[in-house]
Image (spheres, rainbow, N blue to C red):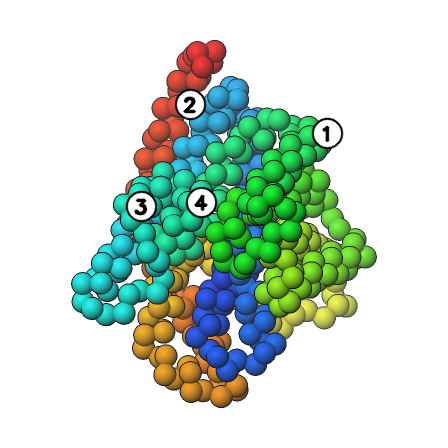
Amino acid sequence: MKEGRVAALDLGRALAIVGVVAVHLSFQFPHLPHGVAIVARMGQYGVQLFFVISAITIFMTLEAEFGRCTGAPHVTLRFYIKRFFRIAPMYYAAIVVYGLISYGAAQSGYERAWVLGAHGATDIMLNVLFLHALSPTAINNVVPGGWSIGVEMLFYLIAPLLFFVAMNRLRLLIATLLLALSMVALSTNACRGGLVCHVSNNSFSYFWPPVQGPCFIVGMWAWYAFRSYLTGAASVTRRASCAMFALAAGFSLATAALGVWLARAHELAPFFAACSAVAFLLFVCSRRGQRTDQANGEGAGEPRATRSSQFAGTLVRRCTSALGRESYGIYLWHFICVYATLHFFQATFGQSDRESSLVLFIATLLAVLAMSYGFSRFFERVIQDRATRVSRTLLARLDRRFDNNPRSL
């Protein structure tokens, strides 16, 4: 089974990256209408949508690999090679690029790039080793937004073990309970022996794995419970589609209440955001299935869509697909574009009224997405394509080794 068969994933990634860019831009517009500002700030939970999609993709991939490989070691090594060469080359490039930006700003006497915090050589090394999610100074100061990459890489480290432990729902439940107990213990320790954490938004306690880990558990459950719907093998009724939409909206409101809107419990907001993400993905799958059924059943007596609406629909699908494919690169490089807009247009953004702020915000969001997409495509060709070729070579050698010696490892 290939990742591309999950039709909702690219749309989910596109929504996630638009939300992340929107929240980082929103702070430059102090006069945005309050409702728009709240919606934009909710974009920070695009990261949790990424986590859910990542968990679904990982278990989908491991399941496919398990069907064609010679055993658990073969599956595990293939997984680590593919994940490393998908994430590490671009991330290492980001370490260099943002390091040069920071160094140049410091040497020129210009205001230090706001996208970076204070860090040292140890913090850089922890980022190189993808252990930075465990350090308060390394987690988000070497590469802006790098905290989510660190959390995700730690999940990659244990993902094969979780996959082989959770081959059925009973063992999945046991694995979930064990992880939950571990996270409760770690969170209790972080909360100084209590159960009430009072975690601040965008703090180390918010970023660290025990708070964000449940998002991956939700993604695991989503794949095992709803794989037939996610892959389009089973259709969702109209009533179930409405229920999914209601659940997505309800969990989103709960996320807002716990997080950026009322700020009641930031440590719980990621879990509710993950639940909202699953409901949203299922709703998208149901809508796609209904559109496919309508297209297949369209008769001569039924009105056809106009060419303009067909063109608009095709354009939206292509844009979301492109943003979804390049979401990782856009995530890494959009901070440069956001910083550039702050540098050149800070006075304009600060002096605009509500209506002008809304128009400027939308225009700037589209411009930043376009520029970040261009950066992503550039680094894709310069770095990622070469890394992919190296990865394929290593995978071919690994496959030959296991094919020739299936019991050697």
Where disc 1 sits, the SS reads: helix
Marks 4 and 3 close (CB-CB < 8 Å): no
Mark 4–mark 2 Cα distance, whole angstroms, equals 32 Å
Give percent across and percent down for residue 301.
Answer: 77, 68
**Which residue is painted at 54% across and 63% down in the image?**
43
Q: Amino acid at mark 2?
A: Asp
**Which residue is painted at 62% across and 64% down in the image?**
263
How crowded is the residue under tag 1: few (<14 C-alpha within 10 Å), some, or many (20+)? few
Q: Amino acid at mark 1?
A: Leu
Q: Which residue, given by chain and number where applicable, does mark 3 sit on? A: 124
Marks 3 and 1 close (CB-CB < 8 Å): no
Give percent across and percent down for residue 322.
Answer: 46, 58
Q: Is 348 on the left-hand or right-hand side of 102?
A: right
Q: Which residue, given by chain and number where applicable, does mark 2 sit on? A: 399
Q: Is 256 on the left-hand or right-hand side of 18?
A: right
Depth check: give the residue in front, 369 or 299.
369
Q: Is 393 on the left-hand or right-hand side of 200?
A: left
Residue 316 can be seen, yes or no: no
First reached walking from the N terminus: tag 3 or tag 1: 3
In the picture, the disc for residue 133 is: 4
